[in-house]
Amino acid sequence: MTAQDTDRPTDHDSPWKEALEHYFQEFTQLLFPAIHHEVDWSRGYNPMDKELQQITADANTGRRHADKLIQVYARDGSETWVLIHVEVQGEPEEGFAQLIDREARWADLEASDNVFALVVMAQIKAKRIKDGATRKDVKIALVRLLYERGYSREQIVRLFKIIDWMIQLPRELEPGFVQAVYAIQEEKKMPYVNTIERAEREKAHQQGMAQGLEQGLQQGVGQGRQLEARRILQRQLRKRFGDLPHWVSEQLEAADVDQLEAWSDEILFAESLDTLFKH
């Protein structure tokens, strides 16, 4: 997604990590059937996030990565680990659309009853469609599919969250999307997704970010004043008393702006460093 697609920050990694953790079996069945066939799914699988952090490090490649390490059991009973490495592009590459058309087979994805097909469809549309109004229409169509495929409430809520993450809209189109979701839920008699709560959460998040930025700016201004006051006092002290002992430097480092300015006022009347700092 390019910057012109939306004024909202894009989160590429989170939806993929969420989808891979909850739908790993469906992921392998859809995209890696040979691996899927070798796993004993009756024994389940176990995400191993802590182990992944210990054995891998972020690569400086200019891309975002969504990695998952999954413990599974093979059909012969042996334990094995599967490392999933997804590189999520921040910018489209030449030929990407043609590759998708040839390999993803959109019609097959639409017809598939595999839950993970919707995740792939959302990612394809998020990558290929730049026009905001078209993105909104596609997003609404995918949400409608959630309610038409007979999924459980839990699955609908989780998949809605993933699609909502992947296909982000300009802010001016959000109200229309919210109303469309309400209409679908009313039509299907399935009020599962609270879009008002979703909007409120986003608003609270944005307000929190703004507050954090303001606090950070204020803190930065305060630190700047403190550094300048310390620098001025150090220069005055050296001119008056020469080289400063270590204990004076420690006092200066620990002092706030008010104390530093008070010492600057008193330096003219101090007979020694000991009397100034009451050492």
Image (cartoon, rainbow, N blue to C red):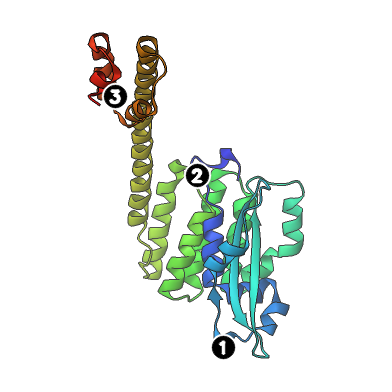
Mark 3 / mark 2, whichever is N-terminal:
2
Q: Position of residue 227 (x, y in %)?
A: 39, 24
Residue name at image x 49 percent, y 39 percent: 7
Which quadrant holds the C terminus?
A: top left
Q: Tell me the mark number nearer the camera, choosing from 3 and 1.
A: 3
Q: Position of residue 176 (x, y in %)?
A: 42, 49
Q: Tell me the mark number nearer the camera, choosing from 3 and 2.
A: 3
Q: Position of residue 217 (x, y in %)?
A: 37, 30
**Could you say whether the residue bearing mark 1 is in a helix, strand or loop?**
helix
Q: Marks 3 and 2, Cα distance to the nearest angstrom?
A: 37 Å
Q: Residues within 10 Å of mark 2 (few under 14, many from 20)?
A: few
In this figure, which residue is indicated by the disc labeled 1? 42
Q: Tell me the mark number nearer the camera, choosing from 1 and 2.
A: 1
Q: Position of residue 107 (x, y in %)?
A: 68, 67
Give the residue type that dot 3 points to.
Val
Q: Nearer the viewer, residue 37 or 7?
A: 37
Give the residue type that dot 2 points to.
Pro
Give the residue type that dot 1 points to.
Ser
Residue name at image x 64 percent, y 66 percent: 84
Mark 3 / mark 1, whichever is N-terminal:
1
Q: Which image quadrant is residue 235 in? A: top left
Mark 3 and 1 residues: CB-CB less than 8 Å, in contact? no
Residue name at image x 30 percent, y 28 percent: 255
**Could you say whether the residue bearing mark 2 is in a helix, strand or loop?**
loop
Q: Is residue 121 left or right of residue 272?
A: right
In this figure, which residue is indicated by the disc labeled 3? 257
Q: Nearer the viewer, residue 59 or 64?
A: 59
In this figure, which residue is indicated by the disc labeled 2? 9
Q: Is residue 39 left or right of residue 160?
A: right
Mark 1 and 2 residues: CB-CB less than 8 Å, in contact? no
